[in-house]
Image: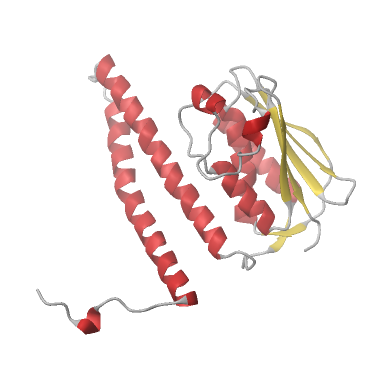
């Protein structure tokens, strides 16, 4: 069939090209999420069937784990893609209540930790000032840190969230676990796309390697930084450092 030159590919440059790429990526990602959700629903329904044999149940659990990982991967990629394309121009900066965000995110962590037999708690937290931030992204960044701490903890372990005014005037929010820890060499690669340390892969098979990348993008977009202190088999502390003013 002949190609109509009027319908052929257009030459786009600069902002037009970036916008076209963004639209394509977002559309493709949403198209992927819909069939994945159907597959997840079907697998979950199979698991609830009392007639499913043990061997088949094991296979369904593995398949559901992988589809969950894929769904998380797409969601994380969408968040990161939006952040990268909005760099320097987040539109919804408002004055947010850090104490409330911490309280509510820790409560989410408590619910998440039940199945892993890990305790999530608040440690010392000062009365913090309101700061300018994009609340949805900030919540996601803190939740990612808590989720990671739970995932890489041992059963019976504890995850503690603390917050304080730091000496330089910034706000420091820390998430500390008693889990597998991270080697020095791996700490240099933690915020690289799709990186997962060998210890992390051995301990938890499910993971996208994008959670910490998203945290870094969010916090840097808000004018802050992220730091980590860790030793293998001795747990980790991730701290986000946020400015009070922009």
Above or below, 154 relative to 100: above
Above or below, 169 relative to 197: below
Q: Is residue 221 visible?
A: yes
Judge by depth and name the residue closer to the eye, 152 or 55: 152
Q: Residue 41, how many percent across, how many down?
A: 31, 38
Q: Residue at x 41, y 70 (%)?
A: 20
Above or below, 235 relative to 133: above
Question: Considering the image in quadrants, where does the N terminus appear?
Answer: bottom left
Name the outermost residue toward the right: 167
Q: Residue 39, how many percent across, how many down?
A: 29, 40
Question: Considering the image in quadrants, where does the C terminus appear?
Answer: bottom right
Q: Is residue 92 toward the left or the right of residue 161 in the image?
A: left
User: Image quarter for residue 135?
Assistant: bottom right
Q: Residue at x 68, y 52 (%)?
A: 219
Name the outermost residue toward the bottom: 6
User: Image quarter for residue 114?
Assistant: top right
Identify the colour scheme used.
secondary structure
Q: Residue at x 63, y 53 (%)?
A: 218
Q: Residue at x 65, y 20 (%)?
A: 157
Judge by depth and name the residue closer to the eye, 32 or 185: 185
Above or below, 16 relative to 128: below
Q: Residue 63, how many percent across, how many down?
A: 32, 30
Q: Is residue 3 toward the left or the right of residue 75 in the image?
A: left
Q: Residue 240, how many percent across, how many down?
A: 72, 45
Name the outermost residue toward the left: 1
């Amino acid at each position: 069939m002949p190609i109509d030159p009027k319908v052929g590919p257009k030459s786009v440059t600069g902002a037009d090209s970036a916008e076209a790429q963004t639209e394509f990526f977002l559309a493709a990602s949403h198209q992927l999420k819909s069939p994945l959700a159907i597959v997840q629903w079907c697998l979950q329904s199979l698991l609830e069937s009392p007639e499913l044999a043990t061997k088949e149940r094991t296979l369904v659990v593995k398949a559901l784990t992988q589809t969950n990982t894929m769904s998380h991967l797409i969601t994380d990629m969408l968040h990161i893609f939006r952040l990268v394309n909005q760099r320097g121009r987040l539109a919804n900066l408002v004055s947010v209540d850090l104490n409330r965000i911490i309280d509510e995110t820790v409560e989410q962590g408590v619910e998440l930790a039940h199945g892993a037999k890990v305790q999530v708690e608040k440690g010392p937290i000062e009365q913090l000032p309101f700061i300018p931030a994009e609340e949805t992204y900030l919540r996601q960044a803190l939740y990612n840190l808590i989720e990671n701490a739970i995932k890489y903890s041992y059963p019976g372990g504890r995850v503690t969230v603390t917050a304080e005014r730091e000496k330089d005037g910034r706000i420091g929010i820390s998430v500390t676990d008693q889990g597998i820890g991270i080697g020095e060499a791996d700490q240099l690669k933690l915020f690289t796309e799709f990186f997962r340390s060998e210890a992390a892969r051995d301990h938890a098979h499910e993971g996208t390697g994008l959670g910490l990348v998203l945290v870094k993008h969010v916090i840097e977009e808000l004018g802050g930084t992220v730091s980590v202190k860790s030793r293998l088999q001795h747990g980790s502390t991730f701290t986000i450092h946020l400015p009070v003013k922009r």
